[in-house]
Image (cartoon, rainbow, N blue to C red):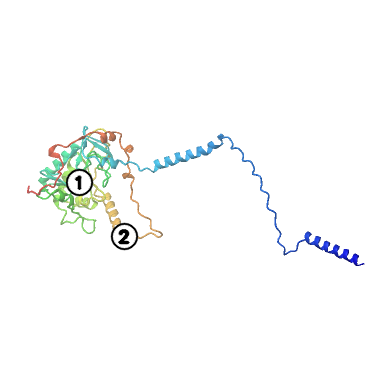
């Protein structure tokens, strides 16, 4: 009996031990067998190059081409004013005005000397005292003959650059050597130094209203000077401020045949601008002015515009829009000028005669 119990007890212990081995308790840590190292998959051989990559290369090339084109488009244009502004002397060509007053050039220009018996040129550093020989001759004639009217001599402003063409600053016209500005300030009785001719300010002819001339400044001698200039057959236009035109219309005298050439224009309150006609083939002729004196409705319209421009303008509602000055006339390229202007620009220079040379040093002030 005792032996049987012993066998039963031993069997029970074996059963419990087998059960524990089959189902571990929740608090027991189970060791996870280490993973077997995976065999590396064979690397596929690179596929042979094909034309499939060509589109990508073409796209890259197209982008480079587009970038180059954009760079060319963004490259600043070479303007005619930059080229003509660098010319220091006239072209060695037969004198000719080429193109239009505001889009042309000048071949064989002549330089008006810094000072003569009846004139002095102003702002000599600009180097704009060049013109067609017929205009230079006319200026000298006017300077001499104006003495008969009590005018002591001309202070000559801008004419043209050595080879004409667009200017770096200032005028849109004066490109063909047929325009000249003459100051309404009388020439002093001495030769001004070069520094004085650079710095002296011209005198305005207007009163405080800017709609009439100041009678203390604008005199009968001014009327006589402008009348003489307009009376020359070669002169086709004389441009003045509307207030000066009004004063000329109101000036006494029966002869009014010259008034039709005098045209009102903005600015021109300290100088008047004379323009002669095209003296040769190759330059454009401007339309003839009407025969009437221009002292009626046209003048009134100009004065009305001047008065309106003097009134303060109300600020428009909304954000302020920056003012952009018209610049189309300043953006002229060589391709927009007559083809002959390229020849003018590339031609050799001719030094001016000794008596016409520009002063390189200040001129001593001397009594005439």
Image quadrant where one finds the N terminus: bottom right
One can see residue 119 in this view: yes
Which residue sits at x=47%, y=38%? 61
- Residue indicated by mark 2: 312
Asked if disc 1 and disc 2 are in contact, CB closer than 8 Å, the reply is no
- Residue indicated by mark 1: 125
One can see residue 233 in this view: no
Secondary-structure class at tag 2: loop
Name of the residue lying farthest toward the bottom:
2
Decide if residue 277 is on the left or right side of residue 79. left
Which residue sits at x=70%, y=58%? 31
Q: Position of residue 247 (x, y in %)?
A: 20, 52
Front-lying residue, 147 or 102: 102
In this picture, is 21 found above or below 268?
Answer: below
Dot 1 alpha-carbon crowd within 10 angstroms: few under 14, some 14 to 19, many 20 or more: some
Secondary-structure class at tag 1: helix
- The label number, if any, that marks residue 43 in the structure image: none
Alpha carbon separation for disc pair 1 and 2: 37 Å
Q: Between tags 1 and 2, which lies in front?
A: 1
Name of the residue lying farthest toward the left:
367
Name of the residue lying farthest toward the right:
1
In primary-sequence order, the first of circles 1 and 2 is 1
Q: Position of residue 228 (x, y in %)?
A: 15, 44
Q: Position of residue 109 (x, y in %)?
A: 20, 37
In this picture, is 178 found above or below 307?
Answer: above
Name of the residue lying farthest toward the front:
3
Q: How many marks?
A: 2
Front-lying residue, 95 or 231: 95
Q: Position of residue 14 (x, y in %)?
A: 83, 61
């Amino acid at each position: 009996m005792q032996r049987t119990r012993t066998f039963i007890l031993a069997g029970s212990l074996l059963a419990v031990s087998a059960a524990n081995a089959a189902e571990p308790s929740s608090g027991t840590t189970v060791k996870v067998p280490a993973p077997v190292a995976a065999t590396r998959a064979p690397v596929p051989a690179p596929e042979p190059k094909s034309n499939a990559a060509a589109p990508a290369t073409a796209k890259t090339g197209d982008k480079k081409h587009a970038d180059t084109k954009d760079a060319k488009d963004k490259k600043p244009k070479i303007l005619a004013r930059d080229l003509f502004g660098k010319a220091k002397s006239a072209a060695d060509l037969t004198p000719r005005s080429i193109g239009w007053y505001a889009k042309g050039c000048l071949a064989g220009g002549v330089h008006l000397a810094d000072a003569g018996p009846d004139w002095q040129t102003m702002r000599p550093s600009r180097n704009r005292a060049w013109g067609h020989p017929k205009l230079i001759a006319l200026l000298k004639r006017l300077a001499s003959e104006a003495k008969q009217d009590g005018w002591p001599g001309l202070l000559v402003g801008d004419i043209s650059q050595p080879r004409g063409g667009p200017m770096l600053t200032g005028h849109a016209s004066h490109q063909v050597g047929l325009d000249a500005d003459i100051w309404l300030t009388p020439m002093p009785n001495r030769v001004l130094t070069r520094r004085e001719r650079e710095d002296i300010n011209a005198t305005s002819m207007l009163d405080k209203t800017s709609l009439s001339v100041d009678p203390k400044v604008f005199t009968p001698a001014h009327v006589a000077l402008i009348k003489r200039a307009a009376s020359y057959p070669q002169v086709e236009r004389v441009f003045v401020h509307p207030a000066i035109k009004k004063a000329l219309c109101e000036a006494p005298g029966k002869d009014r045949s010259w008034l039709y050439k005098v045209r009102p224009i903005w600015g021109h309150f300290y100088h008047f601008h004379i323009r002669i006609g095209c003296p040769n083939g190759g330059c454009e002729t401007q339309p003839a002015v009407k025969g009437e004196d221009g002292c009626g409705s046209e003048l009134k319209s100009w004065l009305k515009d001047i008065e309106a421009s003097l009134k303060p303008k109300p600020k428009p509602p909304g954000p302020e829009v920056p003012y952009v000055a018209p610049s189309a006339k300043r953006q002229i390229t060589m391709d927009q000028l007559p083809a002959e202007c390229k020849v003018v620009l590339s031609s050799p220079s001719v030094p001016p005669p000794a008596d016409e040379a520009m002063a390189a040093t200040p001129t001593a002030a001397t009594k005439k």
